[in-house]
Image: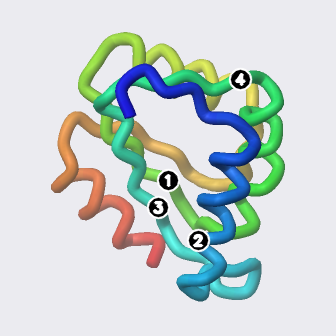
Amino acid sequence: LEGHEFDESDINRQFQSYRTLGISESNTRPIVVDARHGFTIGKEVRDRMAKDTKLLFSAAAVVGNSLSTRIVINFLNSFYDFGLPIKLFDNEQDALTWARRYA
C-alpha cells in the first residue's frame, strides 16, 4: 500500500495470519518483505516488531529499491535488536535465495 502507515491493528492482523499458517515460536520461518512501495512505521509499531518478530521468524529479507527504504532498514538495524538476521535486497530473487538458508 503506497504511503501506508502500519499501525497496531495491521501488525496484529499480520501476526495472526502467520500463526494461522502454522508459524509459531516453535516453528519459525524466514520472511521476505516487499518494501518497494513506500510505507511508514510509527514508534509503537517498531517497538512491537522488535519485540515480537523473533518469536515467529528466523530471518527477514527485505526487498527495497529506494534510498528511503535503505535508510529506514539501516535505521531499524542500528537502533533495534530484532534478534534475527535482516538483510536488504534490490530484487526478490536474491531475497528468496538468501531467506531459504534460514528455512
- For marks 1 and 4, the one nearer the N-term is 4
Q: What residue type is labelled 2?
A: Ser
Query: Distance of mark 2 from mark 3, alpha carbons?
Result: 13 Å
Q: Which amino acid does label 3 sit on?
A: Ile
Quadrant location of the C terminus in the rendered image: bottom left
Which mark, residue 60? 1
For the point 17% across and 55% down, which residue is it?
93
Query: Distance of mark 2 from mark 4, alpha carbons?
Result: 21 Å
| Residue under pointer 3 | 31
Q: Which of marks 2 and 3 is in front?
A: 2
- For marks 3 and 4, the one nearer the N-term is 3
- Asked if disc 3 and disc 1 are in contact, CB closer than 8 Å, the reply is yes
Total marks placed: 4
| Residue under pointer 4 | 42
Query: Distance of mark 1 from mark 4, alpha carbons?
Result: 19 Å
40 in relation to 52, above or below: above
Q: Quadrant of residue 8?
A: top right
Which mark, residue 17? 2
For the point 81% across and 35% down, which residue is it?
47
For the point 50% across and 53% down, which residue is it?
60
- Asked if disc 2 and disc 4 are in contact, CB closer than 8 Å, the reply is no
> What's the coloring here?
rainbow
